[in-house]
Every structure is written in structure tokens, then in C-alpha cells.
Amino acid sequence: MSEWQFAHADKAEKFALVHQFALTKVQGDREIEFRISVKEFVTPPDPAMKFYAEADKQTNQNTMPYTPTGWGSTLLKALSECMGAIRRFPYEGD
């Protein structure tokens, strides 16, 4: 158990350490930067899924907007799922 987790006193609160990453998606002649936040929960909603990743931008905006996310038992698993979701649909913003 990491030291930061000892600050968590109330199990009703969702306390998490946030890890930040950036991915630049190349789409045609454009480069679109996505920032991905991965939360590492002390007491996750599902004990098998301790990590939750979410991108700062939506994809597929003109058809059905989608916010890329990923869950996993490890930081790498959640991050990889989110990155795959970013790649799955085109970015149709400005």
C-alpha cells in the first residue's frame, strides 16, 4: 500500500491519485493532442478495476459523441484501453 492511501479516512468518499498522460493522434495532416487522466482509487467501485482512464476530448462528435475511457486492474490496462478508444473513432472537432 502506498503512503498516499493512508490519507483516505472516509470510505464513502472516492479518493484517488491522478496520473496524467498525453497522446498526439495523427489524423490526416492534423495532430490532435489528447490528455488522459488515470485515477487510481483507494476503494474502487469494482475491486477488480482499481484504475479508470478518461480523455479530455470527445471523438466521433458529428455522429455520436464519445468520451474515450478505460478501466483496468492496472494503470497500463486502463491507459491502453483509453488509448485504443481514442484511436477507434475520428476526431471531428475544430
Image: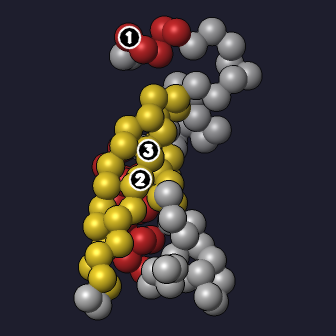
Q: Which residue is mark 1?
A: 3
Task: Give the residue displayed 30% in from the left and 82% down from the top.
Answer: 30
- Mark 1 or mark 2: which is in front? 2
Q: Are marks 3 and 2 in contact (CB under 8 Å)?
A: yes
In-front residue for pair 33/39: 33
Closer to the N terminus: mark 1 or mark 2?
A: 1
How many numbered dots are placed on residues in this image?
3
From the viewer's perspective, is 6 left or right of 23? right
Q: Position of residue 93 (x, y in %)?
A: 51, 79
Colour scheme employed for the rendering of this structure: secondary structure
Task: Give the residue displayed 59% in from the left and 73% down from the top.
Answer: 66
Task: Give the residue displayed 58% in from the left and 25% down from the top.
Answer: 15
Q: Position of residue 75 (x, y in %)?
A: 36, 44
Closer to the N terminus: mark 3 or mark 1?
A: 1
Residue 38, label in figure? 3
Residue type marked 2? Ile
Task: Give the residue displayed 44% in from the left and 46% down from the top.
Answer: 37
Q: Is residue 70 visible?
A: no
Q: Which residue is mark 2?
A: 36
Compared with 2, 57 (above or below) is: below
Secondary structure at badge 2 equals: strand
